[in-house]
Image: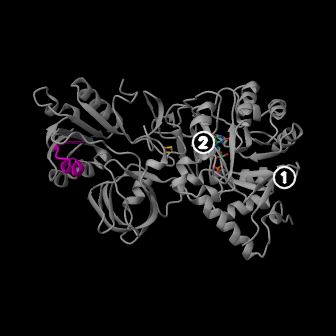
């Protein structure tokens, strides 16, 4: 577990210009920002710490997974799901506003052997790292299946984009799209269909734990990306810890991606 | 360029800007953002004799202009520090100051003896003010007799610069300052965090796993300034001012109130490069006011 800064890529701390704000459904936003400098290499799972502008009551930065990046045009994209005052304010940004960001932070998902089949399971804000992950897997010659869950059909986002990297399966709790129920109740988990070499998951803790349990029971390697509260996001405050086989680890520094068997909530 | 150097006991600091314990890791993580050689000093994350896992998650709650933390001194212990961290940071051209924690006087003494062997740890900061541990910590820093006992015991085994970090969770901070000065402290640093709590009304539950935690950030600055000023008037030893310093103006205010140097804490989380910016800002202030040396400003508050 390399944890020295020497092994990390360069970080940037820069004001970024808002280029586009999309609001596909209530409480869901896609932000595109432009960096004034060249964007360093971003790996799937990496996140950024964003300072919410003009919000004196939002004291700390907020961590967001990096959704996508366009190196040529120096563009970086985020998915913002409104859950508190910081995310609400980000949804109110206007084109042209300046936003301070620090990235890339955290580790990344590890890729399976070329040819192996991957299942990517998520819900809520957990879908954010899936575009970069899908791209990386395709480049690595893996077969990709996404399983996206939501309360109802307006919570299920990014379907078109994700479908360019693999099949997209859907569950909604109200049955308005895809199979009815929780993600973990989807038919893909039935023994005859649950044939994958690697599982990735990101979303609420109970969902990731359930997915991890299903993967472990079937003997499939599984990585989860955690979304703990953070104060700094770059390893210095020790506020974001999660219990692991080797004691408390920083989600922002040793993670956010962990093998589910390494996490204590799993056992 | 104004004269930024200051003296704490017999140590020369190239400038008065240092970073607070627990808000800068062990320096290593921050080297990707800050040129550590530019800092006056680094107070490294609180150390204990043995490995400590700290408190359970959640350990943090954002508050109005600040945050509560309940980290609980998570660290791998002094032996790990000596073998795996110290070698990586010892060659930086800045003061490396260890933050010393214990559950008993004997633990403080034993840890100090081990740190005494590390040449490049030029001073220690005795943390008798951590609100997030059950044994020791703040219990030492909130009663004069125990503050004296631990300072005195550590003084007997330590010849280098001894800084004692005071708790604001007391009725009379000046009395505490005088007590540790009398027991042999070369310097004091203040303030550590103020005990506070945060509640989730919807869930009717505390936000922190420990219920209470330590408040830091701009929310505590007025209290910290007042305490520095009271201590400045009560002791002769130099003071490190701490509490909600977010920019160079805040730093100047602490120096005017009587701090010889300052520690930047929570601000590092929001802008990891802030300590370097504060150094530049202090220089700019001195030039603008045509003040030759920062030491002229220490305690230079004009009351009336
Ligand atoms: C996350 C966190 C961890 C801390 N850990 C320590 C510690 O290990 N030892 C210590 O003496 N003070 C510790 N402190 C207190 C700070 O060093 C400082 O005294 C306090 O935060 C007030 O300064 P600030 O408002 O600039 O942050 C910690 C503070 C925070 C926010
Ligand atoms: S958020 Fe500060 S160490 Fe992870």
Residue, disc 1? B232
Magenta run includes residue A136: yes
Q: Would you identify the image quadrant in which residue B177 lies?
A: top right
Q: Nearer the viewer, residue B286 or A42?
A: A42
Which residue is at the far left? A192
Question: What SS does tag 2 mark?
Answer: helix
Image coordinates of residue B132 in percent, x first then y, are 63, 34
Residue B205 higher or lower than A71, as above or below: above
* Residue at image point 35% right, 70% down: A95
Mark 2 or mark 1, which is nearer to you? Answer: 2
Sooner in the amino-acid sequence: mark 2 or mark 1:
2
Give the image's coloring scheme. Answer: one colour
Image coordinates of residue A38 in percent, x first then y, are 38, 66
Question: What is the CA distance from the residue labelled 2 to the residue labelled 1?
Answer: 36 Å
Magenta run includes residue A165: no
* Residue at image point 78% right, 76% down: B290
- Quarter that holds the C terminus of chain B: bottom right
Image coordinates of residue A246 in percent, x first then y, are 45, 28
The magenta-colored residue range is A134-150
Which chain is mark 2 on? B
Residue, disc 2? B87
Q: Is residue B85 among the parts visible in the rendering?
A: yes
Q: Would you identify the image quadrant in which residue B78 lies?
A: top right
Image coordinates of residue A72 in percent, x first then y, are 29, 67
Q: Is residue A59 among the parts visible in the rendering?
A: no
């Amino acid at each position: 577990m390399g944890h020295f800064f020497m092994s990390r890529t360069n970080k940037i701390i820069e004001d970024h210009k808002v280029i586009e704000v999309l609001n596909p459904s209530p409480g869901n936003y896609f932000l595109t920002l432009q960096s004034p400098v060249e964007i360093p290499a971003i790996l799937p799972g990496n996140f950024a710490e964003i300072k919410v502008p003009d919000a004196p009551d939002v004291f700390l930065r907020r961590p967001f997974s990096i959704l996508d990046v366009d190196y040529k045009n120096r563009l970086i994209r985020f998915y913002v799901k409104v859950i508190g005052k910081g995310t609400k304010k980000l949804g109110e940004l206007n084109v042209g506003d300046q936003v301070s960001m620090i990235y890339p932070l955290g580790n990344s998902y590890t890729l399976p052997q070329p040819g192996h089949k991957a299942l990517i399971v998520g819900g809520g804000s957990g879908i954010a790292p899936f575009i970069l992950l899908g791209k990386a897997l395709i480049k690595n010659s893996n077969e990709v299946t996404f399983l996206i869950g939501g309360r109802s059909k307006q919570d299920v986002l990014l379907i078109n984009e994700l479908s360019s990297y693999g099949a997209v399966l859907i569950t909604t709790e109200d049955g308005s799209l895809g199979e009815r129920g929780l993600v973990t109740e989807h038919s893909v988990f039935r023994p005859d269909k649950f044939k994958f070499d690697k599982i990735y998951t990101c979303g609420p803790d109970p969902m990731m734990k359930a997915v991890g349990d299903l993967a472990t029971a079937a003997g499939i390697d599984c990585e989860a990306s955690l979304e703990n509260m953070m104060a700094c996001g770059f390893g210095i405050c020790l506020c974001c810890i999660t219990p692991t086989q080797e004691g408390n680890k920083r989600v922002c520094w040793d993670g956010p991606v962990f093998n589910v068997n390494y996490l204590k909530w799993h056992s | 360029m104004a004269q930024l150097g200051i003296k704490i006991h017999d140590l020369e600091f190239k400038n008065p800007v240092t970073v607070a314990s627990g808000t800068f890791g062990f320096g290593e993580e921050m080297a990707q953002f800050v040129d550590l050689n530019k800092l006056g000093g680094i107070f490294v994350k609180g150390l204990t004799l043995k490995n400590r896992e700290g408190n359970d998650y959640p350990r943090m709650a954002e508050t109005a202009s600040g945050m509560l933390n309940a980290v609980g001194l998570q660290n791998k212990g002094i032996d790990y520090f000596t073998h795996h961290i110290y070698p990586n940071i010892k060659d930086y051209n800045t003061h490396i100051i260890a933050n010393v924690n214990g559950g008993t006087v004997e633990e403080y003494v034993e840890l100090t003896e081990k740190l005494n062997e590390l040449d490049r740890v030029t001073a220690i900061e005795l943390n008798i003010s951590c609100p997030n541990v059950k044994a020791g910590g703040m219990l030492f820093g909130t009663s004069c007799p125990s503050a004296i006992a631990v300072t005195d015991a550590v003084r007997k085994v330590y010849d280098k610069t001894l800084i004692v970090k005071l708790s604001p969770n007391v009725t009379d901070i000046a009395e505490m300052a005088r007590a540790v000065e009398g027991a042999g402290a070369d310097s004091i640093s203040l303030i550590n965090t103020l005990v506070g709590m945060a509640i989730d009304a919807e869930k009717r539950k505390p936000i922190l796993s420990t219920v209470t935690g330590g408040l830091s950030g701009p929310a505590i600055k007025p209290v910290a300034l007042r305490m520095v000023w009271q201590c400045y008037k009560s002791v002769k030893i130099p003071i490190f001012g701490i509490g909600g310093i977010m920019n160079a103006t805040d730093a100047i205010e602490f120096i005017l109130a009587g701090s010889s140097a300052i520690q930047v804490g929570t601000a590092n989380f929001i802008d990891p490069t802030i300590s370097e910016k504060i150094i530049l800002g202090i220089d700019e202030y001195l030039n603008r006011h045509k003040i030759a040396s920062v030491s002229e400003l220490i305690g230079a508050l004009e009351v009336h």
